[in-house]
Amino acid sequence: SGKHRVAVIGSGSWGTALAKIAAENVYKRRGDFHTEVRMWVREKQVNGKKLTEVINRTHRNERYLPDITLPKNLTAVPHLKDVVKDATLIVFVTPHQFLHTVLRELQRSNAITPGARAVTAIKGVEVNGTDISTFASLIENKVGTPCSALSGANIALEVAKGQFCETTIGTPGPVDSALWSAVFDAPSFRVSCVDDVAGVSLSGALKNIVALAAGFVDGLNLGGNTKAAVIRIGLQEMREFCMEFFEGAKSETFSNESAGVADLITTCYGGRNRKCAEEFAKSGEPFEVIEKRLLNGQKLQGTATAEEVNRFLVARRRQKSYPLFEKVYKISFENMSPKELFAGLWRPSWDP
Ligand code: NAD
Ligand code: 13P
């Protein structure tokens, strides 16, 4: 019928919040969109019932976003091939460690509609030896859809409650910008599109490493000056890393967009990476233990990203130029004391 159909792959806290916005928007814009939005839910038993059935009956995701009422035109679907069937606009929003499995299954089932477009809201980066790439380009390569990247200062629960905020979508061109704005832009969720898929992707991935450093600061009972310094130095490393390894990325994305400085601020105050890193600095327990205890099935992204980015920088022999990234890795995985975060961290401001 020429109408677009939206599918959402992932139903954690952010997947569910984004699916809610998309379902509300396509209903308003039903002249151009099929009103049903399908969301892939990895099946799970919740109090003896299937999570997909609970979501479809109660219109709540009891497991990952409780207390938020979801639109009736949002349908939870347990099988990936049924989620993407006839979809022309596909949103990838799983925790980053599960993307490869999802892409393999999509390749195997061959169910993606020719001409479909994708966007990824996943925060992470793809590392392979001395190579690094965005998840947008990984998705493009594996399933053949052009892929945009959505990232911003977007703590899922606050977005789901309708609190005013903004996001950034890096797109490959104006058609993608118009379509993804129609799917996501809302009075309380303002979308700004930029011509910088790499900048948006890398700011979202790398701020999770900085958020761990901010959590160490909190765990050491240090104050706002120290955290602000860590945020500034972290932003500088994020931007330099992206500009060094991603040709064509734009420095302004980091300073001007929600995906850059604004996301870094919210995550360093209210995010899960910060929270778990505070507990890590206080308790000395490993991150897997803390993640299980504090996050109730939600997933930390910063620790794996710190490890992946460190592995890449070591492979390129560039780790000494990114002391904050290197120290967060060593504190998280090599028994360095959180107190050692600060020695050798400081450099004067970025010089273009
Ligand atoms: P989450 O942390 O709530 O994780 C739970 C999800 O992981 C569930 O859908 C669960 O089914 C899935 N899962 C668990 N084990 C799995 C497995 N083995 N295979 C496949 N899926 C599995 O997820 P989220 O918060 O929606 O995060 C998704 C992405 O969005 C992340 O990259 C995150 O950084 C990003 N993000 C999150 C927020 C937020 O506030 N939550 C905001 C912006 C971006
Ligand atoms: P956390 O994963 O640290 O909660 O950060 C969420 C986020 O990306 C906010 O934009």
Image: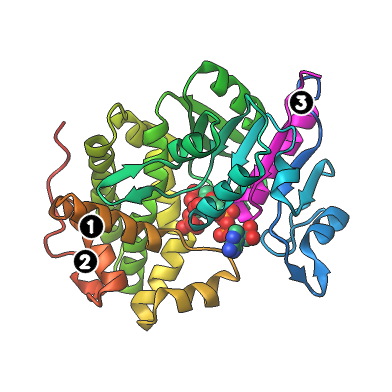
In this image, 82 relative to 143: left or right?
right
Query: Residue 330 location in percent, x, y?
Result: 24, 68
* Local SS, label 2: helix
Tell me where residue 323 sits by quadrant: bottom left
As drawn, 173 above or below 241: above
Give the number of the disc on residue 341.
2
In this image, 269 relative to 255: left or right?
right
Tell me the distance, in whole angstroms, between the alpha carbons under discs 3 and 2: 50 Å
Categorize mark 2 by other alpha carbons within 10 Å: few (<14), some (14-19), many (20+).
many
Give the number of the disc on residue 324.
1
**Nearest to N terminus: mark 3 or mark 2:** 3
In this image, 165 relative to 317: left or right?
right
Asked if the residue at tag 1 contacts the one at tag 2, i.e. Cβ–Cβ closer than 8 Å, the answer is: yes
In this image, 82 relative to 110: left or right?
right
Residue under numbered circle 3: 33
As drawn, 180 above or below 70: above
Q: Is mark 1 within 8 Å of ligand 2?
A: no
Where, quadrant-wise, is the C terminus in this rendering?
top left
Residue drawn 42% across and 63% down? 274
As drawn, 267 above or below 173: below
**Nearest to N terminus: mark 2 or mark 1:** 1
Q: Amino acid at mark 3?
A: Phe
